Image (cartoon, rainbow, N blue to C red):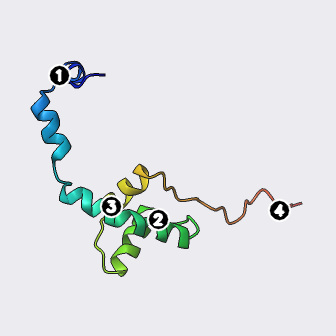
């Protein structure tokens, strides 16, 4: 599709589009890009058991500050979920 048609449909100016396209990456995006491989590595090392709180503490122990909310957001955006393992179900054993 022609650019002028796309800009009209999206209700943006052509100069605004080119400004957006040529803009540098924000500091927040750079930080996220730096943290994502670390989060994935910790997730793999923990066999998928760390949630956002433990992930944040582990990142902090490596010298990288990351709050639990940021860790949770990064995990959610990249499909990283903690798996909850059950230690044993009380209904499995025969009581009588």
Q: How many marks?
A: 4
Q: Nearer the viewer, residue 45 or 83?
A: 45
Marks 1 and 4: which is nearer the front? 1
10 Å crowding of disc 1: few (<14), some (14-19), many (20+): few
First of labels 1, 4 by sequence position: 1
Q: Which mark is residue 40?
A: 2
| Left or right: 4 in relation to 57 | left
Q: Quadrant of residue 94?
A: bottom right
Q: Separation of disc 1 and disc 2 at Cα?
A: 38 Å
Q: Which mark is residue 93?
A: 4
10 Å crowding of disc 2: few (<14), some (14-19), many (20+): some
Residue at image position (12%, 34%) is 16
Q: Do callouts 3 and 1 mark residues in contact (Cβ within 8 Å)?
A: no
- x and y, in percent, of residue 39 in the image: 42, 66
Q: Do callouts 4 and 2 mark residues in contact (Cβ within 8 Å)?
A: no
Q: Separation of disc 3 and disc 1 at Cα?
A: 30 Å
Mark 1 element type = loop
Q: Residue under circle 1? A: 11
Marks 3 and 4: which is nearer the front? 3
Image position of 69 with respect to 23: above or below: below
């Amino acid at each position: 599709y022609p650019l002028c048609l796309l800009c009209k449909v999206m209700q943006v100016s052509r100069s605004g589009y080119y400004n957006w396209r040529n803009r540098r990456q924000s500091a927040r995006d750079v930080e996220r890009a730096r943290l994502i491989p670390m989060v994935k590595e910790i997730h793999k090392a923990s066999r998928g058991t760390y949630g956002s709180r433990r992930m944040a503490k582990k990142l902090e122990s490596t010298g990288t500050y990351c709050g639990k909310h940021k860790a949770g957001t990064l995990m959610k955006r990249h499909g990283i979920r903690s798996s909850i393992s059950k230690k044993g179900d009380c209904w499995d054993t025969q009581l009588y």
